[in-house]
Image (tube, coloured by chain):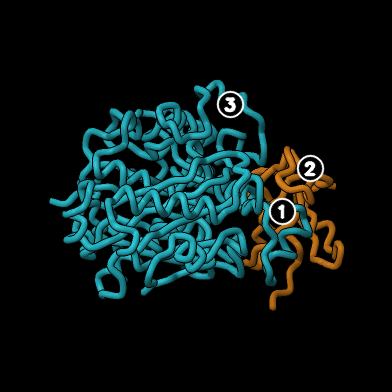
Amino acid sequence: MTGAAIAGVGYAPFTRASGRSVLDQALEACAGAIDDAGVDRAEVDGIASFMVLHDSVPGVAVATGLALPQLRYSLDVQLGGQAPCFLVTQAAAAVATGQANHVVVFRAMNGKSGARVGAMRFPGLGEPHRHAVGYDAYLMYVAMWARRFLFETGQDERDLGAVAVAQRAYSLQNARAVKRRPLDLDGYLASAPIVEPFRADDCTTEVDGACAVLVTSRERARDLRHPPVVVASGAYRAGVRPGLDIADHLLWDDYTRNYTSLLADELLGRAGVTRADVDLAEIYDCFTSTVLMGLEGLGLCARGESGAFVRSGATGIAGALPTNTHGGLLGEGYLHGMNTVAEAVLQVSGRAAANQAAKHEVCVVTSGALMDGSALVLTSDT
Amino acid sequence: MVEAAGRGRVYSWVTARAAVTTAAAADVPCSVAVVELDEGCRVLGRMRAIDDVACEMPVRIVVAAPRAGDPYLEFVRADAG
């Protein structure tokens, strides 16, 4: 237990062309999270965020825009989807050590109309090797892992499709989601090939928007507006040779296992929960394959059985392990997993509306797709 | 440093049917493979025949030349003429 809790969530709408500055959207989401918690803005004394290259604004810009009277903690990191659970963990540590009382953690970007992370070129020695053969988009790298993963685990495109179909059922019920057209397996198989083995419906939808959560102490959270969502544990892990840049996966040995395999035991152990205790999961899903790899890596189902697990309905709203209940990044939009954390907060506090899981006391959340990433165990306050 | 004979097996591959980036438009469709060389290291390159590829398929390098100054490899099936 970290002694910290998440007390509020906020959003700026997910759109294809916001027509707004990134800062403006960041301010809306952060103010939303603070107001949702019922905390006086003047009490907020910490900010944490992440960006890829220069696609967002630093925390001090948000502190300025919100007119925070004194900032005691400010953290900006260069990370992509690996960051949200890591930053919540850092915010929890800041609260636990008295560095700050209330830390707002956010991600904001014009991810569709502005800088698109999936097509960025990164400085350093890794990039020229990839571009020389036309291998120049993040989607291609995750597809490369997916192919080997399916091969080694004896699964195929129908297993990827099962994830797309299961998550679309959730996004149809989610007013924030950008994917609102029904999808079945035939529709999935008919969708356009992009980079095989991925079709269009295997891929997240880039969006403009922002999302934030407010981290405070468990004690203070008890006096706020919503039931506290306890940060039971947080972990980050990178394995051997995580690469020369955020997209450099070529030095990694095993494309069938990502960071989730490495941190699972530590994550659950420090939270004091077992796999059988986990009621629901919010697994980072820039692409369908990372859901299968995450379910297997966390040990929530056996190796090679994740596709069958999803197809059985286990990850649906009436299943044993509702998963990606906002529709995931696939359905709700590619806010780099900050919205995945926010969905977990809504679920554990019983505020997830039509997609609310019946059992929601212990939730596992992950951030990241390949070599490195982070995760949280969030629990109710019991 | 590894001196390689230019033979190996496909560890994984992808086939781009649509250009994800503007820069890639001229290259689509193409298949890109990560090949594990017999000497144990992995290299990235293009399959000459984009639909003739599978995991663990033996391949050999047929082109190893710089392209726009950067390393560029092309692979074919090991038993191809």
Tell me the shade of chain B: orange
**Res. A35 in view:** yes
Using the image, tell me which numbered label, if any, was put on residue B28. 2
Q: Secondary structure at mark 1?
A: loop
Residue depicted at x 44% and y 57%: A106
Residue depicted at x 60% and y 52%: A21
* Mark 3 chain: A
Identity of the residue furthest to the bottom in this view: B1
Q: Name the residue tied to disc 3.
A: A189
Q: Secondary structure at mark 2?
A: loop
On the image, the x and y values in percent for residue A319 come to: 29, 31
Q: Quick check: B11 above or below A78? A: above
On the image, the x and y values in percent for residue A372 come to: 47, 62
Q: Quick check: B18 above or below A165? A: below
Q: Is residue A234 left or right of residue A260?
A: left
* Mark 2 chain: B
On the image, the x and y values in percent for residue A335 come to: 50, 48
The foreground one among B69 and A66 is A66
Quadrant location of the N terminus of chain A in the rendered image: bottom left
Category of crowding for the residue at label 1, using alpha-carbon neighbours closer than 10 angstroms: few (below 14), some (14–19), many (at least 20): many
Q: Amino acid at mark 1?
A: Tyr
Q: Secondary structure at mark 3?
A: helix
Residue depicted at x 45% and y 65%: A63
Q: Is residue A280 left or right of residue A209?
A: left
Q: Which chain is cyan?
A: A
Task: Using the numbered discs, state the Cα–Cα distance from disc 1 to disc 3 in whole angstroms.
Answer: 24 Å
Q: Name the residue tied to disc 1.
A: A135
On the image, the x and y values in percent for residue A367 come to: 43, 54
